[in-house]
Image (tube, rainbow, N blue to C red):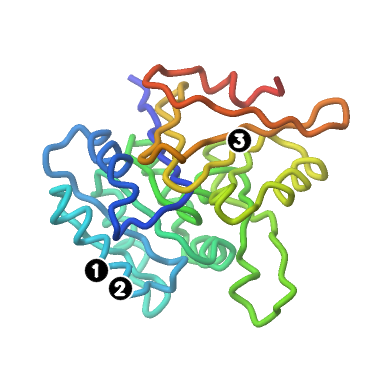
Amino acid sequence: MKTVPKIVAIGGGEIRELETAAIDKRIVELTGKTRPKALFIPTASSDAPGYIDTFEKVYGEHLGCQTRTLTLTQNPPAFDEMSALVLDSDLVYVGGGNTYKMMRLWRRLGLDTVLAEAASRGTVLSGLSAGAICWFRYGHSDSRSFSSNADWDYIRVKGLGFINAVYCPHYHVEKREPSFSETIAKRGGIGIACDNNAAIEIVGENYRILTSTPDGKAYKLFKRSGTVHIVALPQSSEWTPLADLLRRK
């Protein structure tokens, strides 16, 4: 029997304020376990201790998971140890921050191949902002904002490529609309944009949009006849074929 990939990519929101709680609950439900092993990977935030504490409180105390953390920016574990921790987890949650820096480190350490193996085994793959971008072919990233250059601009960062689309988090909240449209106009591809407190859930060959607040929305962007089209993706409990989403229509 073929293993079904499971991905939940969240556009943004304050996890510590439980803004994304409804989505987080769904991530846990996707494991099918009553007390799943939840692995937090906070690479993009340089393994910020406060972020780790927040994850343990939300996914551990609030959602009843067995939480563990994979820290990589200082003294990363050996490949075999890292691989064993990831593959023993029921769900992986990747935190937000500097996507470009995170992806470079993951590839250097070989975590990209481990996560591909986890995906093939049906591990629930999830995360917010940088932790949402990483599952897609490309992402619309503010990684340059972490530099000392005040004139930074958004960049397109290469992700793990499990979904053949370009992901944009914080779509309206950070006023990314013009920049993301420009990216799709120049580079093509199917764009998927999520506001804070909105997520795309992908299970096998189908998807649907999840929200934890009324203002959380999601959109599809694509270029046709030289024009970028923006289509709202309705929140629904019904599943829609992923192939339709990844088609220019």
Circles 1 and 2: CB atoms closer than 8 Å: yes
Instruction: Identify the image quadrant of residue 45.
Output: bottom left
Foreground mark, 3 or 2, reads: 2
Residue position for label 2: 50
Tell me if residue 117 comes above or below residue 39 in the rendering: above
Circles 1 and 3: CB atoms closer than 8 Å: no
Q: Is residue 46 left or right of residue 71?
A: right
Q: Secondary structure at mark 1?
A: helix
At x 40%, y 32%, the residue is 5
Tell me if residue 71 comes above or below residue 157 in the rendering: below
Which dot marks residue 164?
A: 3
Q: Secondary structure at mark 3?
A: strand
**Alpha carbon separation for disc pair 1 and 3:** 33 Å
At x 27%, y 33%, the residue is 30
Residue situated in front as seen by the camera: 244 or 103: 244
* Of pointers 1 and 3, the one earlier in the residue sequence: 1
At x 23%, y 35%, the residue is 29
Residue position for label 1: 53
Q: Amino acid at mark 3?
A: Asn
| Label 1 environment density (alpha carbons within 10 Å; few <14, some 14–19, many ≥20) | few
| Label 3 environment density (alpha carbons within 10 Å; few <14, some 14–19, many ≥20) | some
Residue 105 in percent (x, y) is at 51, 67
Furthest residue toward right: 226
Q: Is residue 65 left or right of residue 106?
A: left
**Alpha carbon separation for disc pair 3 and 2:** 33 Å
